[in-house]
Amino acid sequence: MPPKKALDPKVAAVLRHALMREAVDWAIGNFTNWSKKPHRKIKTLLRAYAAASAEKVIAGDAPMPDMANDPRWRITLSERAYALVDYSHFAEMHGPAIRGSLNAILGEDRAWIYGHALRRIAQYASSVAYMVKNDLDPELLRI
């Protein structure tokens, strides 16, 4: 078995951020109706999905929005980050395998909630990655 690839430090910083933990915990809560202890495999799957999204943003190139003069800078940042991920293609590539794994773990197909949660995780990961890539504190996204 080949050794695990080390995470890029910026991707690791994205995964450690509170916004990402909240997004993953929210998704797990929705998958389990907030009634079960999260399954380790689910958390691992969702973190890998977030990492893949973050990697695309960190590898991409897009200018940082003008935070001083654009009152919609968070929306602009989110749109640019989402475009870097190319979410439709990204979801087609990663979504079926993750949904299949979730079905196997949870014993049911809840595709509608899986899709919504995966989109949210990709959105959070891409926005946090955009901030990390530009050496800015992702907590600014909460303002």
Image (cartoon, rainbow, N blue to C red):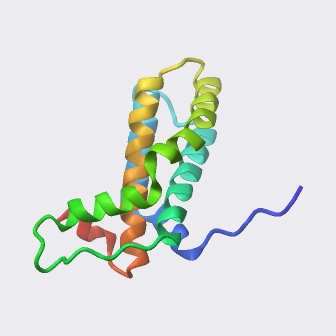
Q: Quadrant of the N terminus?
A: bottom right
Q: Position of residue 120 (x, y in %)?
A: 37, 45
Q: Position of residue 10 (x, y in %)?
A: 51, 74
Q: Is residue 30 above or below residue 4?
A: above
Q: Is residue 124 visible?
A: yes
Residue at horizontal 39 percent and vertical 69 percent from the top: 130
Residue at horizontal 57 percent and vertical 75 percent from the top: 9
Left or right placement of residue 83 versus residue 108 in this view: left
Q: Pick out the residue farthest to the top.
A: 108
Q: Is residue 18 visible?
A: no
Tally of marks? 0
Q: Nearer the viewer, residue 44 or 73?
A: 73
Q: Pick out the residue farthest to the right.
A: 1
Residue at horizontal 10 percent and vertical 68 percent from the top: 71
Q: Nearer the viewer, residue 7 or 57?
A: 57
Left or right placement of residue 64 versus residue 133 in this view: left
Q: Nearer the viewer, residue 80 or 139?
A: 80
Q: Position of residue 101 (x, y in %)?
A: 64, 32
- Residue 5, by quadrant, is bottom right
Q: Is residue 34 above or below residue 87?
A: above
Q: Position of residue 118 (x, y in %)?
A: 45, 41
Q: Nearer the viewer, residue 25 or 57?
A: 57
Q: Quadrant of the C terminus?
A: bottom left
Residue at horizontal 38 percent and vertical 79 percent from the top: 134
